[in-house]
Amino acid sequence: MSYLVFARKWRPQSFEEVLSQDHVTITLKNAIDTNRIGHAYLLTGPRGVGKTTTARILAKALNCEKGPTSSPCQQCDSCRSITAGNHLDVREIDGASNRGIDQIRDLREKARYATASGKYKIYIIDEVHMLTNEAFNALLKILEEPPESVVFIFATTQPRKVPDTILSRCQRFDFRRIPVSDMSEYLKSEAASEGINLDNTALSLICRASGGSLRDALSLMDQLVSFTGNDIKGEEVLKLFGMVKTELLADITSSILAGNTAAAIDHVSGALAEGYSVDELLDALIIFLRNLLLITTGAQNSLGDVPESERRFLMKLAKNLPDLAVLNILRIFSNAAVEVKRSNLPRVTLETAVMTASKLSRIFSIKDLPPVAEKVAQSCIQAEQETLPEEELADTESDSPSVLNEQPSAEAAADNETIEEVGVSSEVDSADDENDEEKEKETSREILGLFDAV
Ligand SMILES: [Zn+2]
């Protein structure tokens, strides 16, 4: 038997099998069951979420020998030939490569002929927004007076590029990105049926990298199976897709927030030595900081597809962290990302951004960071497999010393009181200290001014 990629092998054949698009499939089923069949449907949404698949199932539902039916039999000649892609009355046209007026005129001529064997003549036009204006005008003429048994199903990722005159003649269905929970459950069960083991870290990394596109997730699975065989672990996903480890991002961010410039630079050097490019590292840092900012500002509902391990770490890190500090660090790195593209020495730009950002702690007096940041990150990652209770995580923290924890252990123990102490102790401190602090703040402001960060 020839090899089939997962996206084809696991392609849904009925409305019920289409993942996470119930708002579309239920409406379509009801319309078919009540015999309210339109002449033109527009399926919109991001790529790889089931638009073309649904178009084929709709074609099958209309042309099944027992139909029109919302549950095509899958057995009759019509159903089988639509599944195989060779039904004479169901034509799939790629709008990107057949975008001219001649192709649409040709289609208009052929649409007038009677059906070969099916009940409906169905044209599925993928990426319909790619058609030229003339082609759209020709298409409009058919839609204005559609032949009795012709049904058009248009699919597009960019509905805004479809003229209003066409839109107003279509029943429109908006497809959504697949939520991580649904995708994760689906991949796990489909993989299991193929004898493929996916650990939880690998699963959440694949879901995240797919950006809500099931087709992308399945292509990633294909690559991973070729790369590692049937036992897929998180480490291998990171390696194959050049994704930056959460622990590493956590280390860099914690060092910056603790004002430990040397440690932050060391972590960056380590990452570059491991083979990550400056761009990859910057992009990953920006996304990590963006997620941290969402939490510090209380907008965690917008976090989206963040794996549970990372979410837990971010929540810990965000405790007592001023959102303004995170916002400014994020802006420093966003500016650096733009600058890196123009620079002949991108590494220097990245290092300068790290140094500038780590000076920020002086302005914001960030001294209440969770101690032993990288251990926290590590235990969170491990917790992916065996969800650790909070207390155990706390134990891991206090047991392990770290270079990042600059506080002496006595202070670390009293770490809940640190912020108050900073406030009180300044009364005892001499005026010189205050002057020094003022000078440092002044210097930091000047540096930040260069980056247009505050
Ligand atoms: Zn059938």
Image (cartoon, helix red, strand yellow):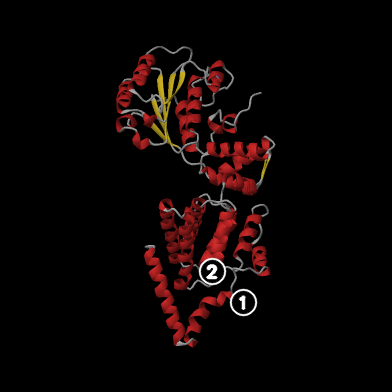
Q: In this view of the protein, can residue 443 be seen by the observer?
A: yes
Asked whether mark 2 and ligand 1 are closer than 8 Å, the reply comes as no
Amino acid under disc 1: Pro
Provide residue 429's location: percent of width, then percent of height. 49, 86
Q: Earlier in the sequence, mark 2 or mark 1?
A: 2
Residue at image position (60%, 78%) is 411
Asked whether mark 1 and ligand 1 are closer than 8 Å, the reply comes as no
Q: In this view of the protein, can residue 19 be seen by the observer?
A: no
Provide residue 404's location: percent of width, then percent of height. 59, 68
Q: Which residue is mark 2?
A: 260
Badge number at residue 408: 1
Q: Quadrant of residue 188?
A: top right
Q: CA distance from mark 2 to mark 1?
A: 15 Å
Disc 1, SS: loop
Amino acid under disc 2: Asn
Relative to 61, 387 lies left or right: right
Provide residue 214's location: percent of width, then percent of height. 54, 38
Quadrant in which the C terminus appears: bottom left
Disc 2, SS: loop
Relative to 143, 346 lies left or right: right
Provide residue 19's location: percent of width, then percent of height. 54, 37
**Crowding near pointer 2: few (<14 within 10 Å), some, many (20+)?**
many
Residue at image position (48%, 65%) is 355
Quadrant in which the N terminus appears: top right
